[in-house]
């Protein structure tokens, strides 16, 4: 007998598939989808879909570090940190990433999704007085907390906020007047947390971090930044949004990922030593997960070493970004307010975006369409990510085909 849950799932899938909105996930048979060219069904495809901005995902040096780590540490500890202990290599990585992002301390997670969904609730859902009653410690009630979140924040930040017990207030995208007006309404609340992406993953624009820090100080709020799309890219040395704005302080917690410019997998939260010490006993996605593989920690360390010393990769990345974006804009495409290697091209209608994506695929170009629920309805787009490894010929090939299809579907004239 079919349960109500199974029935509802079947209805949802039927609707999504009838509207041709169910994503077709391609099976890559040769190469890896993080590099600019790979094979599907024996055919070579050009790709601008990966976040491998600095071309590190296939680095020989990093692969050799990981292989060395496998022989030295094995595949996995097969237990959480609290059960089998933290390895010395974990502490080394935490120190290196904290230093790189100019923060006091850090703790690593298996993914940045786990970081956001563990850290945000931990910052807000402070234990009740009964939890530590034997210590006679006074804790503030959960209801006092208010979260102020940018409307375009990443889905994992939004999910982290949903897991938090405080009141959720969404402010207009990068609108500091709206944020201040909302902060004023909750001026008497003692615990306030402002959350924003550093670089917004679907629009490619940069948060006005200096203004956020100013307002946070004015209204006594903590600042949380998801710098996943900024680490390795923004700032003179690739240290992210704080370096981009020349800030030495003002951000209380930075969560970032190893799975974009660093070319690896994993996530990390950086903050003061006191906050990190607290998160180690309160962030459930850290406490109850198997420890981050030590071999991958060696890989991340090697990637950080390359980012520190090889500024040529970042120079090529920004040169390619400028070239690609300029060509798209000259052709008449709407690239929104992108300021980074994440370059959206607004299409609007979901089905039109899917049709263009399919036609590009038939021409040997892999460009998945982005549509609801990843972006608002009617705001379907392509989300191109330029890397330091793309050639001008590859960029020109995509632009030429996109212009042809843009005219065909009346996106441009």
Image: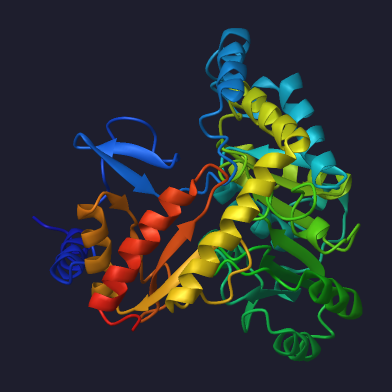
Q: Nearer the viewer, residue 166 or 256?
A: 256
Spot occupied by residue 75 in the image (x, y as percentages of width and height): 52, 17
Q: Nearer the viewer, residue 250 or 221?
A: 250
Q: Look at the image and tell me in which quarter the C terminus lies.
A: bottom left
Number of disc labels: 0
The answer to whether residue 139 is left or right of residue 381 is right
Give the answer, above or below, for where 101 lies relative to 264.
below
Give the answer, above or below, for where 373 lies relative to 59.
below
Image quadrant assignment for residue 61: top right
The extreme top residue here reads 71
**Which residue: 72% across, 35% down?**
310
Q: Nearer the viewer, residue 338 or 103?
A: 338
Image quadrant assignment for residue 249: bottom right
Give the answer, above or below, for where 213 lies relative to 35.
below
Spot occupied by residue 141 in the image (x, y as percentages of width and height): 76, 69
The extreme left residue here reads 1
Q: Is residue 317 visible?
A: yes
Give the answer, above or below, for where 384 lies relative to 270.
below
**Which residue: 28% across, 36% down?**
39
Spot occupied by residue 80 in the image (x, y as percentages of width and height): 61, 29
Q: Look at the image and tell me in which quarter the N terminus lies.
A: bottom left
Spot occupied by residue 60 in the image (x, y as percentages of width and height): 56, 22
**Which residue: 59% across, 26% down?**
296
């Amino acid at each position: 007998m079919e349960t109500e849950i199974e029935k509802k799932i079947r209805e949802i899938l039927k609707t999504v598939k009838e509207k041709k909105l169910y994503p077709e996930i391609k099976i890559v048979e040769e190469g890896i989808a993080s590099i600019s060219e790979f094979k599907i069904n024996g055919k070579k495809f050009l790709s601008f879909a990966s976040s491998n901005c600095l071309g590190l995902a296939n680095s020989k040096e990093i692969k050799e570090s990981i292989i060395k780590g496998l022989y030295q540490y094995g595949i996995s500890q097969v237990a959480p940190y609290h059960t089998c202990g933290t390895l010395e290599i974990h502490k080394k990585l935490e120190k290196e990433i904290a230093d790189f992002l100019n923060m006091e301390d850090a703790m690593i997670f298996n993914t940045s999704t786990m970081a956001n969904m563990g850290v945000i609730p931990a910052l807000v859902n402070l234990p009740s007085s009964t939890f530590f009653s034997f210590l006679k410690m006074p804790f503030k009630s959960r209801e006092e907390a208010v979260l102020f979140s940018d409307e375009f924040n990443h889905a994992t930040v939004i999910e982290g906020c949903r897991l938090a017990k405080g009141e959720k207030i969404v402010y207009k995208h990068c609108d500091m007047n709206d944020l201040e007006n909302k902060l004023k309404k909750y001026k008497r609340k003692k615990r306030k947390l402002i959350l924003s992406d550093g670089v917004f993953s679907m629009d490619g624009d940069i948060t006005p971090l200096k203004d956020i820090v100013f307002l946070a100080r004015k209204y006594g709020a903590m600042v949380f930044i998801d710098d996943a799309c900024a680490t390795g890219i923004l700032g003179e040395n690739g240290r992210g949004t704080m370096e981009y704005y020349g800030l030495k302080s003002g951000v209380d917690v930075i969560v970032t990922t190893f799975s974009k410019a660093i070319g690896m997998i994993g996530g990390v939260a950086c903050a003061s030593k006191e906050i990190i010490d607290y998160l180690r006993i309160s962030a459930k996605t850290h406490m109850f997960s198997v420890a981050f593989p030590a071999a991958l920690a060696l890989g991340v360390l090697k990637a950080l070493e390359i980012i520190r010393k090889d500024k040529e990769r970042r120079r090529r990345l920004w040169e390619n970004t400028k070239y690609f974006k300029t060509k798209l804009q000259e052709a008449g495409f709407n690239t929104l307010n992108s300021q980074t290697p994440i370059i959206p091209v607004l299409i609007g209608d979901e089905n039109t975006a899917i049709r263009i994506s399919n036609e590009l695929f038939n021409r040997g170009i892999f460009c998945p369409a982005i549509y609801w629920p990843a972006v608002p309805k009617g705001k379907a787009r392509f989300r191109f990510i330029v890397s330091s490894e793309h050639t001008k010929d590859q960029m020109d090939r995509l632009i030429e085909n996109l212009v042809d299809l843009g005219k065909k579907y009346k996106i441009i004239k």
